[in-house]
């Protein structure tokens, strides 16, 4: 009897051993599948070229201040940031947008005289009621706010850069009491700051130009509910751009023609890169270097730009456009062309640089008077789909190798700039995702 029990004991032990091994292997297999799935999900969210569906669509906004260690916000900064997530105004007048509408983003500072002009010009644009106008503010100025709230010709959404230097009068990114000034030597007077390549320390009103543009781009493309799901083009204009009546219809035509007529063009423009020109007036389309007056590009191009965040944020120039021309565009590996028509649909009218022209006594619109000739040809779409494309090569301008004009040497500005690049991507459904 004992002889018969021993083999059964061994068989039972062997079965238990096999069961343990099976369960362990099954658990390992499940673990590997879960890891693979998670890795693929994270990879696809950042690297996929398929833009039919926005990979960030549906993710809830998180408190970026806790994740990225952004500057401590004032009460005004917090209130303004909350306004960014309000729905657009005029929904009662324009409850639905056109199916293939192209959003328009107007970025402004504090030049109410200019804003009145551009708003009036937009009100006369054919098709403007079909789309969404987003006005991005660098700082808060009551008159600017009131002007935008008075718009009734389309859906309008206001957003405010919550970390604008103009909102921080006594601390970074504004002016801190301990900041170095001019060409101060930090080691001698024990001040804070890093000089630029020319030995000059930061000026908040200067660095705000680049900060605002970069914050706005990240917020529009990846933050706002109204636009983060858009794969197509978005148009960007400034407060000193007069928009002609045919601008939106020409924009729609250019966006449609872009992949057919100029597949190597990265964007479309409403005006020549030469800000003094209103076009050639000939019967052909133009592919030239990307200009900064009425430019539009799609999400594919935004992703290429976003991948160069470090290069953008560390280049020592306070101008966003020069930074793009000197560092970001050259990284694409080939000339960056933009498609436009032979007649301008947007005109630059500002006479002052930077943030001047705010007061009634300091108006910089042709010495106080605006004189833009709106011709009959500017009132109707004037682009022909049968026209050929003339490519303007080797145009003068900033490019790879340019050192920059400086003004952007402080490490705090560079880090804040990088934080803007990550603020909508640091947390996705509770999973940390690094941008690389």
Image: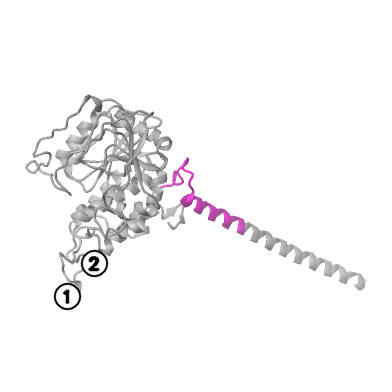
Q: Quadrant of the N terminus?
A: bottom right
Percent across and percent down for residue 352 are: 14, 46
Question: Front-most of 180 and 263?
Answer: 263
Q: Position of residue 88 (x, y in %)?
A: 31, 36
Which dot marks residue 194?
2
Q: Is residue 91 visible?
A: no
Q: Is residue 1 left or right of residue 237?
A: right
Residue 426, can we see it?
A: yes
Snapshot quadrant of residue 237:
top left
How far apart in space, not on screen, are marks 2 and 1 (Cα)? Answer: 13 Å
Circle 2: is it few (<14), some (14-19), or many (20+) Cα within 10 Å?
many
Among the 4 quarters of the image, the one containing residue 344: top left
The span shown in magenta is 32-60
**Left or right: where does residue 2 sit relative to residue 378?**
right
Label 1 packing within 10 angstroms: few (<14), some (14-19), many (20+): few
Residue 95's tag is: none
In the image, residue 58 above or below residue 388: below
Q: Is residue 261 left or right of residue 22?
A: left
Q: Is residue 91 above or below residue 333?
A: above
Q: Identify the residue position indicated by label 1 in the image.
A: 188
Q: Give the answer, above or below, for where 123 lies relative to 222.
A: above
Picture coordinates of residue 350, whole percent (x, y): 16, 41
């Amino acid at each position: 009897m004992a002889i018969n029990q021993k083999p059964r004991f061994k068989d039972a032990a062997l079965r238990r051993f096999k069961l343990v091994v099976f369960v362990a292997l099954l658990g390992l297999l499940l673990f590997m599948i879960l890891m693979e799935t998670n890795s693929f999900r994270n990879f696809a969210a950042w690297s996929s070229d398929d833009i039919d569906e926005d990979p960030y669509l549906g993710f809830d906004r998180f408190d970026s201040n806790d994740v990225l260690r952004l500057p401590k916000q004032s009460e005004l900064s917090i209130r303004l940031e909350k306004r960014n997530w309000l729905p657009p105004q005029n929904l009662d007048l324009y409850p639905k947008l056109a199916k293939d509408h192209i959003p328009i983003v107007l970025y402004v500072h504090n030049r109410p005289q200019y804003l009145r002009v551009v708003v009036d010009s937009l009100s006369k644009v054919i098709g403007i009621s079909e789309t969404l106008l987003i006005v991005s503010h660098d700082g808060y100025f009551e008159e600017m706010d009131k002007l935008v709230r008075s718009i009734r010709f389309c859906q309008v959404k206001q957003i405010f850069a919550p970390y604008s230097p103009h909102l921080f009068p006594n601390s970074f990114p504004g002016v801190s009491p301990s900041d170095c000034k001019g060409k101060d030597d930090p080691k001698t007077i024990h001040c804070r700051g890093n000089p630029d390549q020319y030995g000059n320390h930061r000026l908040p009103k200067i660095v705000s130009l680049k900060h605002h543009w970069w914050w706005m781009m990240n917020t529009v493309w990846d933050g706002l509910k109204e636009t983060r799901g858009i794969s197509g083009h978005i148009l960007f204009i400034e407060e000193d751009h007069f928009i002609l009546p045919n601008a939106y219809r020409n924009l729609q035509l250019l966006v449609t023609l872009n992949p057919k007529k100029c597949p190597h063009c990265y964007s479309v423009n409403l005006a020549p890169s030469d800000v003094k020109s209103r076009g050639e007036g000939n019967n052909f389309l133009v592919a030239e270097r990307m200009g900064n007056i009425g430019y539009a590009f799609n999400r594919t191009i935004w992703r290429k730009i976003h991948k160069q965040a470090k290069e953008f944020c560390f280049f020592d120039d306070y101008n966003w456009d020069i930074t793009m021309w000197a560092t970001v565009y050259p990284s694409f590996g080939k000339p960056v062309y933009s498609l436009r028509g032979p007649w301008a649909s947007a005109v630059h009218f500002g006479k002052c640089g930077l943030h001047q022209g705010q007061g009634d006594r300091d108006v910089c619109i042709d010495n106080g008077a605006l004189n833009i000739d709106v011709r009959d040809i500017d009132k109707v779409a004037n682009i022909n789909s049968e026209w050929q494309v003339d490519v303007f090569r080797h145009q003068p301008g900033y490019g790879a190798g340019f050192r920059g004009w400086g003004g952007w040497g402080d490490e705090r500005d560079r880090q804040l700039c990088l934080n803007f690049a990550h603020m909508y991507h640091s947390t996705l459904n509770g999973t940390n995702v690094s941008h690389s």
